């Protein structure tokens, strides 16, 4: 973000006070800040009391061996029991847990808590029958259908950590995750609906299984939901239908209590190197952190609210704020399979109108795309049920915030801009809807019980009005425990930068305004944020150089009006390739290379532009200066080139022609 935009932002002086009725009845009031500060462990213990434990903890936090935390030490708990059974036992079995909305207009299914309990129990029995034991990993590669949630909860119920892989990832990306966590079973479906057409998933699982087999890892079973009815290849030794195994299993299943630190799931996310990191979350602290913040930040009133989070369960937002947080709170929620604009652009608003959604949580990139379509579409729907709006994934620009509040929220609803990460598991920085006067574009303050600061290079907090690095100054219950199989990478990535202070380094830049409120400014490392999805520059670079035409590549995230950032790739072709294709690679080169990235990682990683260049700007020590490439990609005058080994290179690059990959 440029200095100019930044100073404009910080002179934002619109303020939105919480509505009086919301403030009066808010789940969490202003006194929570002081209470949490006076006794952080007591505060989290109180949040933990909201759950049902088989055995209570002896100690809230063990931070004797930082950065390896243990929360609710000695406690025993079952996450699925907390998300399902206990609501049924409390007499709320008839409450709808999930209003599922399929993409085809005629597809819909409501599941009450009692029905969800039966389904989860059956799936738990079926997984056990397939040989899954406590501690075994299960990969889930599915569309947004109820079975995806059921599969996750069934894994949690039997203590088998799941790893959900976003359905938009390729077979290669799926295989690398299956191998890294050595998944024994994969749960998938024949396909899902995407823009009106069935889109296959099972073939990618078949391919991933073949790739993993070559590297010596055998997936034992693949459990397949029939969703679209499309043709699938079948291997009788491995593949089993969900309707043959789960539907016929017993609905009786006694949940076992696991240690609070028992692994709940591994969620892969991109880091600054090519290899995705398996972020490990454990059971007790994660469930406390997600259920508490869901109650606190969204002011959830489970008896009356209808909640909808539009994320995909393949991302952390889906784990924390579709599955574990809301269901642990006994919420009624919408789960939607498809895209926002099918069969027409008002689909999301129709869903809000139909189900009388009261709390809606989405990403700025979606809001910006609706802004482009114009307010006529949402204006023609009845959105008066909404009382609270949330935003996540990237900084929300004030313009989008105001549009969201006015057009979608009818000017009544607070907007909570929630900052967090795959690693943090739960929201850490956000306004409290009944307490905080919102400023468009600011995530405001750390939540009660959370320690966040903005520090300079030396780890010293900056004064108000200044910027620096966002750090977290104390442990929190839903924090990641490690990177799966790589404790050293965990220490190096998050805790080495400010080792002396013992701070967690989030990788984000931030600024404190004159009031001390926080403005998130995006990543300070080689991680991009495209439509709220995290992508690593190095991962895309490795994908590009794995193509036979490519000698070298550098990838940057360039500011994009729709997606926040977009992938721009600079590519040096191999000499052999230019002999046949020509120096500039010829007309079709951008498409060939971008299809290759799609295949290696998935459609989300596809570059917006590919520039064929003769050289890359490097320092004398050989480090690519991405800052200069960003200048070119964002059409700025190229900055300081004095540290370049060859300062004429930037002229060559700037003169080159950008090729869009849209064709
Ligand atoms: C990165 C984490 C948290 C779930 C979705 C993304 C950026 C996230 C905000 C926000 C500004 C935000 C940060 C963060 N980010 N929320 N409200 N304002 N930036 O999870 O893929 O782990 O990415 O997303 O850069 O580090 P993720």
Image (tube, rainbow, N blue to C red):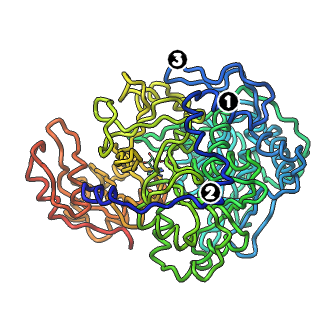
Name which of mark 2 and mark 3 comes first in the sequence. Answer: 3
Note whether residue 342 is visible.
yes
Q: Please name which of the two marks, 3 or 1, marks the residue nearer to the observer.
A: 1
Note whether residue 178 is visible.
no
Q: Please name which of the two marks, 1 or 2, marks the residue nearer to the observer.
A: 1
What residue is pinned by disc 2?
A: 203
The structure residue drawn at horizontal position 53% and vertical position 23%, both measured from the top left corner, is 68
**Location of residue 591 in the rendering, given as x and y in whole percent from the top left corner:** 37, 66
**Location of residue 511 in the rendering, given as x and y in whole percent from the top left corner:** 35, 46
User: Camera-side residue: 659 or 267?
Assistant: 267
User: Camera-side residue: 317 or 355?
Assistant: 355
**Location of residue 311 in the rendering, given as x and y in whole percent from the top left corner:** 59, 57
Name which of mark 1 and mark 2 comes first in the sequence. Answer: 1
Residue sitting farthest toward the top = 64
Q: Are marks 2 and 3 in contact (CB under 8 Å)?
A: no
What residue is pinned by disc 3?
A: 65
The structure residue drawn at horizontal position 29% and vertical position 44%, both measured from the top left corner, is 466
Q: Is residue 323 above or below residue 333?
A: above
User: Which circle marks residue 45 in the picture?
Assistant: 1
Q: Secondary structure at mark 2?
A: helix
Q: Is residue 28 above or below residue 363?
A: above
């Amino acid at each position: 973000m440029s200095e100019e935009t930044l100073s404009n932002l910080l002179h934002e002086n619109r303020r939105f006070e919480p509505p009086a009725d919301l403030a009066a009845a808010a789940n969490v009031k202003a006194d929570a800040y002081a209470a949490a500060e006076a006794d952080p462990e007591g505060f989290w213990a109180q949040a933990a009391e909201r759950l049902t434990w088989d055995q209570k903890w002896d100690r809230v936090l063990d931070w004797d061996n930082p950065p390896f935390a243990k929360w609710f030490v000695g406690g025993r708990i079952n996450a699925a029991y907390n998300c399902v059974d206990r609501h049924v036992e409390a007499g709320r079995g008839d409450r709808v847990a999930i209003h599922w909305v399929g993409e085809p207009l005629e597809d819909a299914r409501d599941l009450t808590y009692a029905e969800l309990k039966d389904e989860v129990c059956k799936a738990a029995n079926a997984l056990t029958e397939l040989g899954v034991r406590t501690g075994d990993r299960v990969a889930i590669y599915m569309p947004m259908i109820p079975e995806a949630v059921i599969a996750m909860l069934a894994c949690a119920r039997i203590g088998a950590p799941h790893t959900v892989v976003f359905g938009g990832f390729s077979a290669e990306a799926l295989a690398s995750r299956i191998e890294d966590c050595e998944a024994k079973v994969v749960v998938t479906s024949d396909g899902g609906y995407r823009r009106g057409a069935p889109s296959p998933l099972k073939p990618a699982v078949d391919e991933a299984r073949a790739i993993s087999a070559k590297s010596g890892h055998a997936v034992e079973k693949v459990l397949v939901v029939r969703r679209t009815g499309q043709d699938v290849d079948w291997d009788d030794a491995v593949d089993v239908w969900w309707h043959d195994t789960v539907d016929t299993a017993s609905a009786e299943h006694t949940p076992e209590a696991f240690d609070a630190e028992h692994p709940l799931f591994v969620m892969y996310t991109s880091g600054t190197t090519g290899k995705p990191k398996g972020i490990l979350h454990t059971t007790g602290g994660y469930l406390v952190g997600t259920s508490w913040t869901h109650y606190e930040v969204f002011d959830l009133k489970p008896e009356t609210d209808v909640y909808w989070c539009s994320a995909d369960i393949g991302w952390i937002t889906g784990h924390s704020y579709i599955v574990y947080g809301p269901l642990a709170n006994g919420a009624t929620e919408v789960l939607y399979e498809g895209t926002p604009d099918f069969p027409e652009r008002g689909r999301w608003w129709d869903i809000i109108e139909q189900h009388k959604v009261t709390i809606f949580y989405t990403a700025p990139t979606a809001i910006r795309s609706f802004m482009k379509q114009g307010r006529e579409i949402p204006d023609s729907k009845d959105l008066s049920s909404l009382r609270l709006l949330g935003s996540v994934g990237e900084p929300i620009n004030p313009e989008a915030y105001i549009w969201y509040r006015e057009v979608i929220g009818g000017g009544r609803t607070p907007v909570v801009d929630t900052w967090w990460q795959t690693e943090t598991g739960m929201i850490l920085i956000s306004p409290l809807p009944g307490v905080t006067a919102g400023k468009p574009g600011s995530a405001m303050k750390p939540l009660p019980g959370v320690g966040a600061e903005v520090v300079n290079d030396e780890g010293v907090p900056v004064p108000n009005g200044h910027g620096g690095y966002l750090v977290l100054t104390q442990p929190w219950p839903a924090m990641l425990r490690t990177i799966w199989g790589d404790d050293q990478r965990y220490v190096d990535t998050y805790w080495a930068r400010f080792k002396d202070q013992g701070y967690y380094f989030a990788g984000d830049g931030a600024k404190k305004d004159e009031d001390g409120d926080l403005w998130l400014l995006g990543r300070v490392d080689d991680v991009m944020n495209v439509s709220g999805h995290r992508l690593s520059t190095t991962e895309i670079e490795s994908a590009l150089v794995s193509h036979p035409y490519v000698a070298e590549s550098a990838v940057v995230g360039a500011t994009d009006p729709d997606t926040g950032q977009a992938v721009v790739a600079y590519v040096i072709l191999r000499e052999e390739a230019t002999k046949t294709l020509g120096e500039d690679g010829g007309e079709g080169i951008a498409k060939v290379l971008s299809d290759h990235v799609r295949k290696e990682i998935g459609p989300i990683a596809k570059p917006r532009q590919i520039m064929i260049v003769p050289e890359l700007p490097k320092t004398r020590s050989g480090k690519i200066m991405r800052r200069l490439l960003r200048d070119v990609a964002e059409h700025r005058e190229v900055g300081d080139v004095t540290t370049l080994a060859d300062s004429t290179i930037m002229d060559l690059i700037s003169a080159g022609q950008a090729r869009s990959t849209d064709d």
